[in-house]
Structure formats: structure tokens, C-alpha cells
Image (cartoon, rainbow, N blue to C red):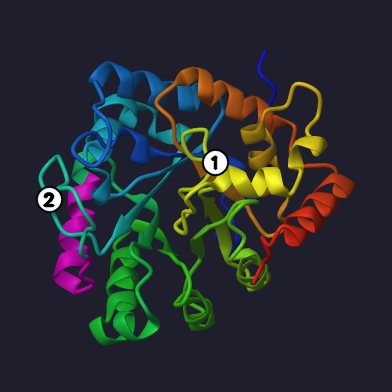
Amino acid sequence: MAKLLPTSILGRTGLEVTKLGFGAMEIRGVPRGRDVTEAQAEMILNSTIDSGINYIDTSIDYGLSEGFIGKFISHRRDEYLLASKCGCMITGPTVPEGPQPHVYTKENIVVGIEQSLRRMKTDYLDVVQFHGSPSRETLEENGSIETLLELKQQGKIKHLGISGTLPNLPGQIDMGVFDVMQIPYSALERQHEDLITRASDAGIGIVVRGGVAKGEPGESGVSKPDPWKTFETANLDDLLEQGESRTDFLLRFTLSHPGMHTTIVGTLNPAHMAQNAAAASKGGLANDVYAEAKKRLEAAGEISE
């Protein structure tokens, strides 16, 4: 029998979340991702819930993912919390290649959320996050917060969030309106480490992305040409438990941050899902190992900011 996944309370939302979540970007399909069959999507989504994971993150920008969620797991809606994004441009079932523009007007936000609700066959979203890390000024100019508050009053969304990165993240924290923030972070990309602490201390629920992506580092928003080089320079292999993989170590490093509440990991492979769940069930690294890992990373030039 699989071990139970550790849980935490997602900041002031009061929601109990598993510390391992699922990122649905991996089921977005072509052209921005790899080809995904309906059978693959059905299997990985149900395997996610069966593994005990209760937090699923998606976006209009993630192509086929919302439709797959609605088709294959909407009948299990009471078993998971559902987070999506807003500000994305409305598209068909697939999303074109290249960077996607974001528009934070009331019209675009409302139309997008209504589309997400229809696609995922649900009456409400537990968390809606502004996609693309818009600045405080952009959100204020467009009245974007007020738009989400209206949708919250209508019962269509439960909590306000933002997917934030530098340089806009400090200002987003200072706004004091967000219940949840999705922030990139991993042992190999620690630029937001101290800001995670700051946001968490302010009562914001922290969703980490990029701690492990497809079993590999380097997709947390500040990708490096050879992320494993930092791992090797810091001699982190010396800190692995017997039988522990590098990706398991990275996941557990992320879980060790006292300010994080859940980390979303995407995969199409149920075996990888099971491996991630097994690693997460162990919880974070031992305190001395975590401290030593940070010390070695700093010596290798990977410092927090």
C-alpha cells in the first residue's frame, strides 16, 4: 500500500493540500508540447488522484489539458482542488507555438474563466492565478483584481492567486490581495528562495513550480544551459541516500523549504508519478542534509536572493 502523502494548509485559504501536486502542462499536446493521446491523459489524470494527490494546476495556455480534465476526471471533482490561470488569450483546443500574450482586461478574464469552467465541467475553480507575472501597475490599470473579486462573489472562484516571478514578485506580495502565489524554485534555481519566505510569512499559500519537471530540472522559469552542472559542482551526489535519485533529492529539497505548501510536478508517465509520490511521502530532507546542501550550493555559486 502506498504511503500517504504529507499535507499542509495552503496559507490563508485554509485548504489542506498534498505537498505534491500535479502540473497539467504535460498533457497540453502539440504544437507546444509532445503528442498526447486521450488514453495517456485519462491514465495519468486518474493515476494522479489514485496516488493521493489532491491539487491539480492547469491553464488555458496548456492546450488540451483543461478539456482532458473535464472529460476524464470531472466525475471525481470532490477528490481534488483545481487551480487554473487567467489573463490568457482565448484559443481553440490547441495553443500556437511561441510565447503567449496575456491581456488582463475584464472582458478577457471573464471570458477565459467561463471557458475554463465549461471545459473542465465544474461550477467553480478553487484557485485562479494571473498568468504571466503581471506587474502591480498592469493589474491596477485594468481593474483586474476587482474583476476576480466579482467572480469570487458570484461563486465561480474561491481564491485569488498569481503566478509570479522577479522582477514583479515583490510588488505583487506587497499588494496584499493574493491568497496564493505560484513561484518558481528548485535547489538549482534559488532566485526566489527568500521571496517565498516573505510571501509565506504574509499568509500567502505557496505553490512551487519547477522543483522537478518531467524528471529533470531547468523549467522553473530561469532555465540554465546545463542545470546538472551545478548539481555536480556542488557535489550533491555525496548527500544522496542509498538508492535515491537526483530528481528525488531535488524534489525533497523543495519540500524542505519551510515556506512552501505544495509543489506541482508534471509527467505523462504513471511510473514517474509513482516515483515522485514515493519520494514526497518521505517528506523533506533531514535538517542537517538540507543545511549542508544549501551550503554546498552557495559555494558553487547557486545562492538565494
Locate residue 69 relative to residue 167 in the image: left or right.
left
Which residue occupies the foreground of this view, 78 or 34? 34
Q: Which of the image's four quarters has the N terminus?
A: top right
Question: Is any atom of residue 5 visible in this view?
Answer: no
Q: Main secondary structure of the magenta part?
A: helix
- Counting residues from the N terminus, which is met first, the one under dot 2 or under dot 1? 2
**In screen coordinates, is 158 left or right of 113?**
right
Q: Is residue 283 magenta?
A: no
| 140 to 183, vertically: above or below | below
Q: Is residue 114 magenta?
A: yes
Verify CB contact (< 8 Å) between mark 2 and mark 1: no
**Residue in the image at 69% along x and 43% along y:** 232
- Viewer-proximal residue, 247 or 264? 247
What span is colored magenta in the figure? 102-117
| Residue where numbered disc 1 is placed | 212
Q: Dot 1: few (<14), some (14–19), or many (≥20) neighbours within 10 Å? A: many
Q: Quadrant of residue 137?
A: bottom left
Q: Residues within 10 Å of mark 2 (few under 14, many from 20)?
A: few
- The relative height of residue 69 versus residue 148 in the rendered view (above or below) is above
Q: Is residue 130 left or right of residue 51?
A: left
